[in-house]
Amino acid sequence: MSAAWTLFTSLVLGHLRTNVLRSLVTLVAVALGVAIALAIDLANATAVDSFASSVNVVSNHVNLQVLGVGNGFDERVFPRIERIGGVQYASPAIEDAVVVGARPNDPFSGEILRVLGVDVVRPLPRDAGGSSNASSGLDETSTGADLYRLIDGRGVILSQRVAQRYHLHAGSVLPALAGARPIQLVVSGILPPTLAGVDSSVAFVDIVTAQELFGKVGLLDRIDCIVDPARLPSVQAQIQRVLPPGTRAIQPRVRTGEIRRMLRSFQINLAALAYIALLVGMYLIYNTVAISVVQRRPEIGTLRAVGATRTQIFWTFVAEGMLFGLVGSVLGLALGAFLAQPSVSAVARTVSTIYVGTHADHVVYAAPVLIKAFVVGLLMATFSAVVPALEAATTAPAITLRSAGFEGRSAARPDLRLGALALVLLLCAGITSRAPAIDGIPLLGYLSGLCIIFGASLLMPLLIAGIAWGARRGSAGLPPSVRLGVANMGAAPLRNSVAIASLMIAVGMMISIAVLIGSFRTTINAWAAESLQADLFIRPLGLADATYDARFSPLTVERLRRLPGVAAVDTFTFITIPFRGTITNLGAVDFATLAARPKTRFLGKVDVQRLAATLPGSLGVLASEPFVTRFGMHVGDVIPVETPSGEVNFRLAAVYNDYSSDAGVFLVDERTFARLFHDDNVNSLAVYVQPGADIVRVRTRILRSMFPLRVDVQTNRELRSLVIAIFNRTFAITYALYFISITIAVLGVVTTLFALVLERRRQIAFLRYLGLSISQVRRMVLAEAALIGFFGGLCGVAVGMLLALLLIFVIDRQSFGWLIELHVPYDFLVEAVAMVVVVALLAGLYPASVAARIRTAEALRTE
C-alpha cells in the first residue's frame, strides 16, 4: 500500500501540482459533461414526477382512480362506487384548465392553470391517527379560505406564487379564459408555499363551479378513491362492473406509466445527446493522461529500473483518471444541480407544448439520478485512462529514458491494426443501422452511432499521418513557421488524433443536429403548406399549446358559415385516449371534404374519391405515420377503442403523413365521433374565404360574430409562422447541448497544444538558436492549431453527416415515426469548418505565447 501511495504521489499528485492549468481545464471539461447529463436526467425525471404528483393531488393515499374518455362520464355512477365494500374514501373531480394573462396577437402569452374541481364540503380522508392526510389543504385553517365564497361565488384557491405574480389577495378578482370564454374567479384562499405535493400551477374550485365553467354539468372527469390495499384487486373489479362504457378504474401508477411511455422516446433522445458531451470529456481525459505519460517518461523509466512493476505503473495512471473522474463528477453534480432549473423549464415547456400539460415549481433531486451521473462520470473517466496506462506499463525502461521514445514509435509506424478495427466498427455501424427497434427504442441505432464515433476516432492516427505527408509536400512555398507547424502535427499523430477526435465528435454532433433540425424544419414547412390551406384559423386567445384547446359549440360553427365572405368552415376535434399501455390521440374531422379540399398527403396509392364517399359516418379511420409506426399497424387492421358507447373496432383505411404529434393520431369522421362520444363540440376552426372577398373584413366579421368569446383569428401566413416558432422553441435545449460539447472540445485543443509546446521545449529552443524568431514560433504553434481545427472540422462534417443520416432515417424514424426529407445546409457546413478553425486559433493563442517565452539556454540543458 505504501509503495502504491508513493508512486501515486510522485507520478500523479506531484505532476498535477506542476500542471495546474491543464488539470483545471480537464476537471472543468469532466464537470461540464457530468453536469449537462445530470441536468437533462433531472429534467426528465422532474417532468414525469410533476405529472405523477398531480395524480394524487387531493390525497397522497389515493390508490385507485376512475377515469373517463373524452368529455367525462355520468356523475350518477359516484354513489354506486361509494357503496362498494372496501372503498374507504371517494372524491369526485373535474380536471380542466384556464389561461390567465393572455394577450391578443401574442401566441406565447399567458399561463395555464390546471383547475381541479372537488367537493369542498366533503370531509377529507384521515389516517389511522385521525389527522388529515390530504395534500390539497382545502380547509379554512391552512388556506384562510372563505368557503361560502368558494361554494357560492365562483371562488378559487390559488398558490402563493400565482397570487404574487398577478398581485392578488383574498377577495381579488382573477380574469381568466375557460377555453375561449372569458370568466372571472374570486380569490377565496391562498395555499401556503410550504404545502407539500401541490404544484403552484394547480387552482382549486368547488366541483359545481368547475362543471359550470367547463360545460360539464352532470359529468365527472375522474373519481379519486382510497381502497383497502388488501382488497384492491377485487374492489377494482367490482368498480369496473358498475362503470359506464368508456370509463376505467386504474391505479395511479398505471396512469403515470402511460405518460412515461409516451415521453420515453423524447427523453431517451435528449439524454443521448446530453451524454455526448460526457463522451467528449472522456476523450479529453484520455488525452490528458496520455500527455502525462509522455511527459513523465524519464520518471517511469527510472521507477521501472529500480523495481516498480508494470502492474503498479498501470494502476497508478488508472488512478489518475479515477481522480479526474471523482473530483470532476463531484463538481459536475454541483454544477448540474445549478443547471437543472433552466433545463427543467425548457423540458417542461416542450412537454407541455407537444405532449401533456405539466409544470414544475422545483427540481426533483432524485437520489438514483444523482448516483447514476456520479457513477457514469467516474467510470468513463477511469475507462478513458486505461489505454495510456497500458502504454506506460508495457513500454520498456530503456525506451522511456530516451527523449522521444514514446511518441516516436507511434509516429514512425502508425498502427495498421487500429485502422482495421476502425473499419470493422464502421462496418458494424452499417449493419446495426438496418436493425429494427427493440420495444420501440432504437437501441441498435444508438449502438450504430457509437460505432461511427469510435470507428472514426480509431482511424484518426492513420488519417493524420496521410494528411501530414500530403501537407508536407504541398507546403513547399509556405513560410518556414507554417511548414514546421505542419511537420509538428504529423510528428505526434497519437496525441493529436485524440484532440482532433474530440473536436470531430463535438463538430459532428453540431453538424448532425443542424442537418436534422434543418431537414425537419424544411419538412415541417412543406407539410404546413400542404395541410394548412384555409385562409383563416381560429384558436383561443393567448397560449399556443398542444395540451390546451377551446371548445366551440355547433351553433358557433353554423353562425360562422352564414357570414358574408365565408366559403366554408372546417372543424377539428382532438382528445387523448389510452391505447396499448400508453397515450395516443384521436381526432375528428369531416371526411366528406377529403376530395373537395385535399389537405392530406397519403402514403401509398389511395383513392381519395372513394374515401370521401365511404368514410363519412363509418368506422373507417385515417392514421398518421407516427401512429402506425409506433403501434406496428397496417391498412386494414382493427383499432379497438373504449368509447362512451362501448368498445368500438375502428378499421384503418389509409395512412397519412403528419407531424403534429409523435404520440400518433388517428382520425374518425365527425359524425361518427359525435355519435360514439356524445360530444358535438369542436376544438379548432379553419375558415375558407370566398374568392374576391376582403380577408381583413371577413376577419373582423368573425371576431364580432364570436363575441364575447376571446379568440385570435390568424391568417394562413401567421399560423405557419407560429408552427415554426413552436418548432424552434422545442429545439432550443438541443442547441445548448451541442454548444457545451464544442466548449469541451475547445478545452481539449488548448490542453493538447499546451502539452505539445512543453514537450517540445528543447526543439523550440534549438530552432531559436538556428534563427527562428519569437513571432515565427508563435506562427508555428498557431499553424498547428489551425491545422488541428481544419482537420477536426472536416472530419466532424463527415462524421456529422453520417450521424445525421442515422438520426433522420433510423433513430427518429424508429422513435417517432416521422418521415423527414434530407436537406443539407451546405453553406452552414462551410461556416462550421471556418468557425472551428477560428476557435482553434483562439485556443492556440495561449500555448503560442508560452512557446514564445521559452528560455532557450535552460531548455537545452541536459536532463
Image (cartoon, rainbow, N blue to C red):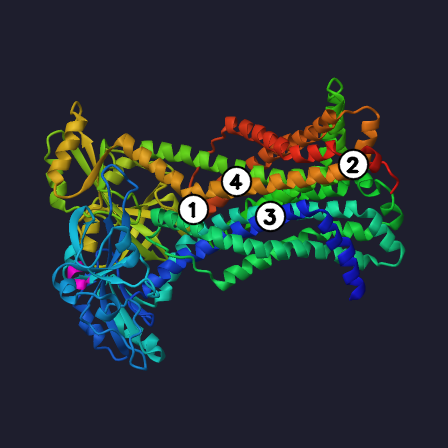
Q: Disc 3 or disc 1, which is closer to the eye? A: 3
Q: Nearer the viewer, residue 191 or 517?
A: 191
Residue drawn at (78%, 36%) of the image:
760
Q: Disc 2 or disc 1, which is closer to the eye? A: 2
Residue identifier under label 2: 760
Mark 4–mark 2 CB contact (< 8 Å): no
Q: Nearer the viewer, residue 749 or 395?
A: 749
Q: Disc 4 or disc 2, which is closer to the eye? A: 2
Q: Determine whether, in the image, residue 402 is placed left or right of residue 645.
A: right
Secondary structure at numbered mark 2:
loop
Secondary structure at numbered mark 4:
helix
Identify the amino acid type marked 4: Phe
Q: Residue 331, position in %: x, y?
A: 57, 54
Does residue 655 appear anywhere in the picture?
Answer: yes
Alpha-carbon span between mark 4 and mark 3: 15 Å
Alpha-carbon span between mark 3 and mark 2: 26 Å
Predominant SS along the magenta part: helix
Q: Residue 413, position in %: x, y?
A: 81, 38
Circle 2 residues within 10 Å: few <14, some 14–19, many ≥20: some
- Which badge, 3 or 2, is on the more N-terminal residue? 3
Above or below, 632 against 557 in this view is below
Identify the amino acid type marked 2: Arg
Alpha-carbon span between mark 3 and mark 1: 35 Å
Residue identifier under label 4: 739
Residue identifier under label 1: 816
Identify the amino acid type marked 3: Val
Q: Residue 654, position in %: x, y?
A: 33, 43
